Image (cartoon, rainbow, N blue to C red):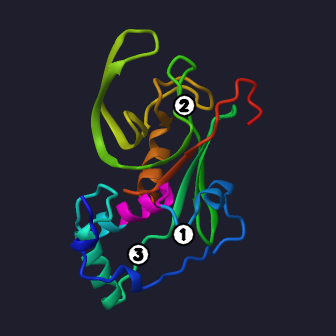
Amino acid sequence: MPTDRLYAQDWSHAPLGAWTWNSSDLPPVLRRTWDPNQFTEITKGAVMRFESDHGLRVDGYAGPRVRRMLQLAMALHLRTAQPYRLVMVDQAVPQRLCVWEDGRGVVFQTLCSTGLPSAPTQPGLHVIFLRNREQTMQGVGPSGRPYRVEHVPYVSFFYGEQAIHGFPRTVYGGPQSAGCVELPIAAAERVWQLTGYGTLVFVSQHKANGTG
């Protein structure tokens, strides 16, 4: 349905905003994706973070409720307390996850393990849309056998059933999951603290030869 009539604001005279990055080492994926005239994953993530901060339904939809809350936030000069961060998952062996922060660069990094070739982790730019501090995870593994693991900690879903989470392994750094990004428990806790609803997750293309 047409949405223009849902807003009191005359869009032909809408207030204009501006965006500038604080970092000189801006990750290429952000530089490529940012477009002030398009609703990109960056915009979607920002809307979701705003919704989460203000107690709205976190769906990434900039509807009437988001519009009214934005107007209120602008009038009260409210700003988010969280810096802008991006999670980057490098699938080149040894596989690594790092958290980049605008104005500071990489603030955390750790070895990780992504999906096996038969259950690959989806490459591309995604948005964290669901978080659970602990949950049971189940499904069908790459071998075709069903699995069920209880008390999986620090779970952040970014694509379908794929999530960043803690999982005890003997070693990390190579593909061995059913599609998720697995981290040592302590590292998963730190990533959980640094991220939230709307945080972008960039997963690189998998390279079998480990060259990036």
Q: Is residue 159 left or right of residue 76?
A: right
Residue 80 lies within the magenta run: no
Q: Is residue 111 left or right of residue 16?
A: right
Mark 3: amino acid = Ala
Between circles 2 and 1, the one closer to the viewer is 1
Q: Which SS class for mark 3?
A: loop
Measured in 3D between alpha carbons, the distance from the residue under mark 3 to the one under mark 1, in whole angstroms, is 23 Å
Quadrant housing residue 35: bottom right
**Sequence order check, earlier mark of 2 and 1:** 1
Which image quarter is the C terminus in?
top right
Label of residue 114 in the image: 2
Q: Is residue 14 visible?
A: no
Would you name the residue on which mark 1 appears?
36
Q: Is residue 201 left or right of residue 189?
A: right
Q: Position of residue 134 (x, y in %)?
A: 29, 41
Would you name the residue on which mark 3 appears?
81
Q: Residues within 10 Å of mark 3 (few under 14, many from 20)?
A: few
Q: Residues within 10 Å of mark 2 (few under 14, many from 20)?
A: many
Which image quarter is the N terminus in?
bottom left
Q: Which residues are magenta?
A: 39-49
Q: Position of residue 199 (x, y in %)?
A: 45, 56
